[in-house]
């Protein structure tokens, strides 16, 4: 599947710039097994890079102007590197502008490039196409101009680029896009950025994504609001227990004891965060021990928390998870990523995949009149140069 994408990108580059590209970069989207909305709360997360990617073709153009073509959008823009980077009304360009802004503000020396990119990561589905765009573009500039930026710093600068665009995200998406490894999930400690690879062995179960096809237009403002509410929550904890500076060091009881001191929203957000941090630890052990049923049960519990306490679900996602709960062959399901639309991630017993896909497609279309999109997941490598 990716060969077609790569060839298409290479030939478009040749056609548009009438020259051969110098570098090809492949940058993946990600899934997250469990650990939602806790990367910005000092939690652990359990994501993996996937085999859906953005492919970039690059060359230096020996000028101060970069020209970037988004093949799938049939759109392009130019940016003069010698002037201060500004936001633009074409949102997709801002992710790249944000990366350039980061490179400049960190003092890196680089010049103009010609670039074509094309993607098979669905946009707005919770698979982090924006992190793939930021990290892939940055990776390419790093390689072309020998900037020696370490992979972790590519992830951190990608995250800052996203902040510049306007979403105050955590580190999970950029980290997993850059650091992913085939057939491994990453356990990231978002407090220290230490990480470990664990085998992505789901035993008798397949990972399937059901895409609600609902695009999360509320995402940016609601996301930033959740983050702010968490900051308010931890500030109240700290005020009452000065020795605690992070949700990581709270128990559920710590939060429950402070219920009267918090607004209802802040209380429920904080409770969700503390519970989710604990669930990820249990889930990672369950995965290591081959206890996939327990992992599935924890995923259902995460969804419940995301829906009722963190309030980042929507009717369509709740219906998909409820359908999953009714099926013996689906042992875990939850919304994945920021929420308000996008995908659910599901553990489906091997042999039952087609039955479940057909059933869910029909029931979902009946309920909402929306087509359910379905993706089988393969876990792939992080951002890399394509050498051929
Ligand atoms: C988005 C953000 C991530 C993370 C998830 C929710 O994908 O970019 O940093 O917070 O939402 O887990």
Image (cartoon, grey):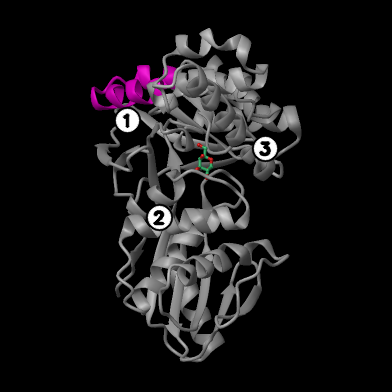
Res 348 → quadrant: top left
Instruction: Name the element at disc 3.
Output: helix
Residue receiving disc 3 = 222
Q: Nearer the viewer, mark 1 or mark 3?
A: 3
> Measuring 33% from the left and 51% from the top, which residue is drawn there?
179
Query: Circle 1 — which element?
Result: loop
Camera-side residue of 95 and 271? 271
**Any magenta on residue 293?**
yes
Task: Determine the main secondary structure of the stretch shown in magenta.
Answer: helix
**Residue where numbered disc 2 is placed:** 155
- Residue 130: where, in percent of width, then height? 54, 55
Task: Specify the quadrant that holds the N terminus.
Answer: bottom left
Provide the residue designation for mark 1.
Answer: 202
Q: Secondary structure at mark 2?
A: helix
Viewer-nearest residue: 121 or 171: 171
Q: Which residues are magenta?
A: 277-298
As measured in the structure, the alpha-carbon distance from the residue carrying label 1 to the one carrying label 3 is 33 Å
Across and down, in percent, residue 170 comes to 48, 43
């Amino acid at each position: 599947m990716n060969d077609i994408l790569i060839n298409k990108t290479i030939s478009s580059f040749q056609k548009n710039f009438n020259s051969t590209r110098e570098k090809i970069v492949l940058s993946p989207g990600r899934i997250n097994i469990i650990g939602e909305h806790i990367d910005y709360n000092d939690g652990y997360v359990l994501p993996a890079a996937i085999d859906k990617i953005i492919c970039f073709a690059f060359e230096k153009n020996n000028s101060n102007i970069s020209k970037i073509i988004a093949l799938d959008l049939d759109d392009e823009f130019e940016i003069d590197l010698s002037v201060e980077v500004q936001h633009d009304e074409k949102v997709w360009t801002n992710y790249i502008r944000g990366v350039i802004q980061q490179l400049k503000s960190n003092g890196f020396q680089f010049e103009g490039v010609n670039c074509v990119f094309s993607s098979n990561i669905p946009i707005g589905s919770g698979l982090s196409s924006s992190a793939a765009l930021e990290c892939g573009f940055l990776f390419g500039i790093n390689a072309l101009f020998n900037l020696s930026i370490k992979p972790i710093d590519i992830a951190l600068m990608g995250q800052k680029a996203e902040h510049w665009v306007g979403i105050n995200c955590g580190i999970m998406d950029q980290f997993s896009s850059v650091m992913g490894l085939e057939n491994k999930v990453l356990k990231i400690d978002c407090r220290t950025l230490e990480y470990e690879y664990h085998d992505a062995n789901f035993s008798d179960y397949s990972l399937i994504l059901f895409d609600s096809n609902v695009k999360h237009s509320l995402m940016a403002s609601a996301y930033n609001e959740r983050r702010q509410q968490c900051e308010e929550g931890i500030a109240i904890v700290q005020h009452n227990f000065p020795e605690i500076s992070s949700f990581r060091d709270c128990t559920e009881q710590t939060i429950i004891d402070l219920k009267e001191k918090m607004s209802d929203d802040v209380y429920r957000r904080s409770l969700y965060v503390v519970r989710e941090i604990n669930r990820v630890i249990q889930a990672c052990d369950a995965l290591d021990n081959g206890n996939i049923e327990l992992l599935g049960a924890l995923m259902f519990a995460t969804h419940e928390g995301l829906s009722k306490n963190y309030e980042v679900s929507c009717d369509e996602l709740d219906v998909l998870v409820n359908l999953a709960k009714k099926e013996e062959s689906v042992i875990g399901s939850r919304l994945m990523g920021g929420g308000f639309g996008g995908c659910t991630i599901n553990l489906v017993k091997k042999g039952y995949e087609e039955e479940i896909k057909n059933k869910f497609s029909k029931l979902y279309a009946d309920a909402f009149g929306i087509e359910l999109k379905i993706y089988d997941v393969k876990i792939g490598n992080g951002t890399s140069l394509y050498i051929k």
